[in-house]
Amino acid sequence: MSPDLTEHTITEAVQRSFDTATDDRFRQVFVSLVQHLHDFARDVRLTGEEWFAAMDFLERVGKVSSSTRQEVMLLSDILGFSMLLDRINQHAGSSVTSSALLGPFYVAGRPTADNGDDISDGVSGTPMFVTGRVVDERGEPVAGAHVDTWHSDGEGFYDVQQTEKLHDEFAMRALLTTDDDGRFWYRSITPRYYPVPTDGPCGEIMRGANRSVMRPQHVHFWLHADGYQSLITQLFYRDDPYINRDAVFADVESLQADFVRHEPGVAPDGTTVNVPFVTLDWTFVLSDSAE
């Protein structure tokens, strides 16, 4: 007959139930998860009522999630878990550009564009000219690298949040390719800071913590090149009013950039712009070792 389990012996009993697992990594992850989950309950003296509330919360997170709303991802982001994983897998001490979160607004079916194209697709806003260079850890150019880029409009909304207004067309996103010198460039409009969605379950956490729900102005990049590790990152406006208060903790100092404002005149692509415009320039360093 098995002895009665206590709040301490039950942890070991549950961990032993994974002894028959044939996958060592599977067993390692779940044994550790059980240990930390049980320790958490003991540490805060969790009540049954609180646990039922937590399960209800997770159920609602799942129900509100869809192909256009990633509430599960948002939960991971606002708890700092997404950035924790990012830091764990970051190339510490190297010259490789810091990575950042993919975010919920990436779209795989984005249009391709040529260098110099205007990817705003007619959406109004302050013109922004982005120039970039992709190099390896020795500073050598990476030719033929694919550069996914996307960002919000001047009111803080992405195209996928305005499908009716934009008639289901993509805007402010594109896939470009670097030239022989590793360079890419395009025109768009300047993005704006915006709040993470707070009308769902994750909003309850933000309100309960009385913390900032804002994301500073930023542009997303996902770089792919044969023989290199892909890089998912974001560049943040250094002087944004919400910098260092990012709701998802991604605005690290090494990714804070100058979004330089210019008076009307000649843009980096040689065209004349009759209104004020913004320029953003950055060099992205990829890891040479593709895993």
Image: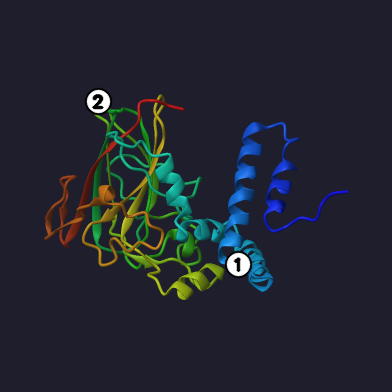
Give the vertical position of 159 relative to 15 (above or below).
Answer: below
Question: How far is mark 1 from mark 2, CA to CA?
Answer: 53 Å
- Classify 102 as above or below 231: below
Residue 121 position within the rendered picture, expressed as x and y whole percent measured from the top left: 37, 55
Residue 142 versus residue 2 in the image, above or below: above
Residue 45 is marked as 1
Relative to 54, residue 146 above or below: above
* Residue 69 picture quarter: bottom right
Pinpoint residue 77: horizontal percent, then vertical percent.
47, 57
Q: Residue 236: x percent and y percent? A: 29, 54
Query: Can you tell which quarter of the image residue 92 is in?
Result: top left
* Residue 271 rendering spot, x and y as whole percentages: 17, 49
Residue with the mark numbered 2: 138
Closer to us: 42 or 203: 42
Q: Nearer the viewer, residue 52 or 253?
A: 52
- Disc 1 crowd rating (10 Å Cα; few below 14, some 14-19, many 20+) is few
Nearest the camera: 158 or 54? 54
Question: Which of the two discs, 1 and 2, labels the residue nearer the N terminus?
Answer: 1
